[in-house]
Amino acid sequence: MAARSRALDSADRIYFTLAALIGSVLLVYFASVPLLGLNVAFHFYLMLWITMASAFNVASGFAGYMPFGYVAFYGIGAFTTAILVKKAAFPLFLALPLSGVAGIVLALLFAPTLRLSGIYFGIVSLALAGICRLVITNMPEQLTGGSFGLQLGSRAHPVQSFYVMMAVMVVALATILWLSRSRLGKALRATRDDADAAEMMGVNVPIVRLYGWLISAFFPAVCGGVEAWYTNVVDTETAFNTLTTAKTVIYAVAGGLGTVTGPILGAVAMVWLDELIWRQFPLLNLLILGLATIILVLFLPRGIVGTLLRKKPQWRRYIP
Amino acid sequence: MTVAIETRGLTKRFGGLVAVDKVDLRAAAGETLGIIGVNGAGKTTLMNCICGLYRPDDGGDVFVGGERVTGQAPHVVAHRGIGRTFQVPRVFRRMSLIDNLLVPVLDRKAPDAELIGRAEAMLERMQLIDLRHNHAEELSGGQQKLLEMARMLMPDPPIVMLDEPFAGVHPVLCKFMIERIEETAHAGKAVLLISHDLTSIYRLSTRVIALNQGRIIAEGGVDDIRGNPAVIEAYLGT
Ligand SMILES: Nc1ncnc2c1ncn2[C@@H]1O[C@H](COP(=O)(O)OP(=O)(O)OP(=O)(O)O)[C@@H](O)[C@H]1O
Ligand SMILES: [Mg+2]
């Protein structure tokens, strides 16, 4: 018994050492991008997609939902920051967290749909995102800038927004790493695997799902705000683009839903592949990416990390 | 003897079908109540009503430790002290065995390390310890039954409900499970046991109820049930 507990402690030590090591390598790498004159735009979006895919994973991989309208949170975040900064002269450091709050408020409005499951939830989510887009499109032009969108003006600062994006990514990943080991995370996973059984084992399923949902909605909303700042412009066309959801889903699935490392690796691999393909075949970009996704899902149905961990169950203790 | 679990006039309809029909049952601490009946007699539905998964119809009631729990959410009923297993195992497929066992005790104040220690001891007892980091879906059917039993016992509930624990289980494993159930009853729990395996039912039960078309057609000690003409008729047909 004592020996076994010690073995567990040593597994934990390996886990935390690995996490700290990989975390600091990534941190140093991303932090030095602007300093070394590497491609800031590429890495900005890499971090954005890592954050998006990881946060999406909370709703899908942890909680078992497929929110096909995930872009709604991103879009609402983008518009919140843009409107607050442009129309209400809010400082960015206040507007960005408020974007996250807007995401949470929207998630609370959508919360009744958590009773649905599977494809029904997905379709309703998609419809709700469409409604959000319609509502914003039909708001007064003075507020949202209409079809021209909102220009944030002279506030653009690629390097500052790069580091803020990095901070958002770090907080998101830390949250998800915590979640994966927390009791809430276990409750969420149990709910995903069998909600009725979890409920009969004493899990307060509606509350647990709601927490997961809110976490999952907060980060894309902040991402939307940061991206608005970075690109300096927000319009409904890009802020509520379904392609954003599609990319998020593909990256998360490619890496492996339900693992912490999966969506990170998936985003890195696919964003890099996207960039490569885009350079070689600018016109066929989406087609080839779609094919790559299909092949990946066919051969690695659980994603890169998910498939690896299925082959090597004993690694699950070290690879979250 | 304190009554741990009791139902009064418990009824459940599915459309026109009355799956459970005015069932009154009670089990005291340390007692094992066997529940028998042909396929579709209403045994599983009865358990589903007791643990709050289904809301009973027609004003039927469920009492746990003398307190009415009718209409409460399943997680509330679970915290009142009911644990259960399922006819077809419902393990948390993509969670490790240890995490499976932690789910019913997530609300406990005890530190994680202590709970994990208890989960490991429980897996040891069920001879699943070597698989503790595997996902539950990687277990065989019989092993999943054992895992469910361990998961049920983790929070140490005063009332346990077992739905066909022996179905599809190897005889050696069966014997092992029977011993675990005996242990559980001796530990002072009220046990509700559904099984088609009459030998085990007769061996384990202090009392037995026989259900047919949702209704209790016979009730009593093992010997009363064994010779009861209504039971024989329901089981063998006329
Ligand atoms: N969710 C449901 N919806 C509709 N009918 C149901 C439902 N669950 C059970 N029934 C019906 O209720 C009746 C009792 O079913 P139940 O599962 O309780 O039987 P059982 O005694 O457990 O049988 P078995 O020994 O085969 O497990 C059956 O006729 C079944 O068709
Ligand atoms: Mg049944």
Image (cartoon, coloured by chain):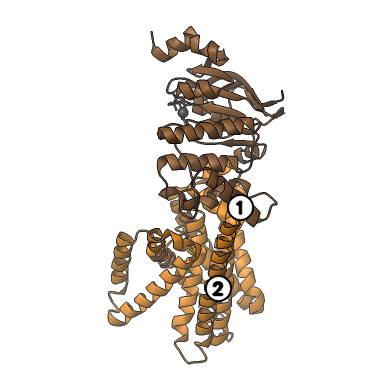
Chain colours: A orange, B brown
Residue A117 drawn at (x, y percent) = 47, 47
**Element under disc 1:** helix
Ligand 2 within 8 angstroms of badge 2 C-beta = no
Are labels 2 and 1 on one chain? Answer: no
Tag in front: 2 or 1: 1
Q: Chain of mark 2?
A: A
Residue A201 drawn at (x, y percent) = 58, 42
Residue A261 drawn at (x, y percent) = 47, 67
| Residue beneath the point at 41% across and 41% down | B141
Amino acid type, callout 2: Thr
* Residue A181, above or below B79: below
Location of mark 1 (residue): B117
Is residue A147 visible in this depiction of the protein? no
Taking the image as shown, residue A32 lies to the left or right of residue A242, namely right
| Residue beneath the point at 61% across and 64% down | A102
* Residue B145, above or below A66: above
Q: Chain of mark 1?
A: B
* Residue A58, above or below A194: below
Distance from disc 2 to disc 1, alpha carbons, whole Å, reads: 23 Å
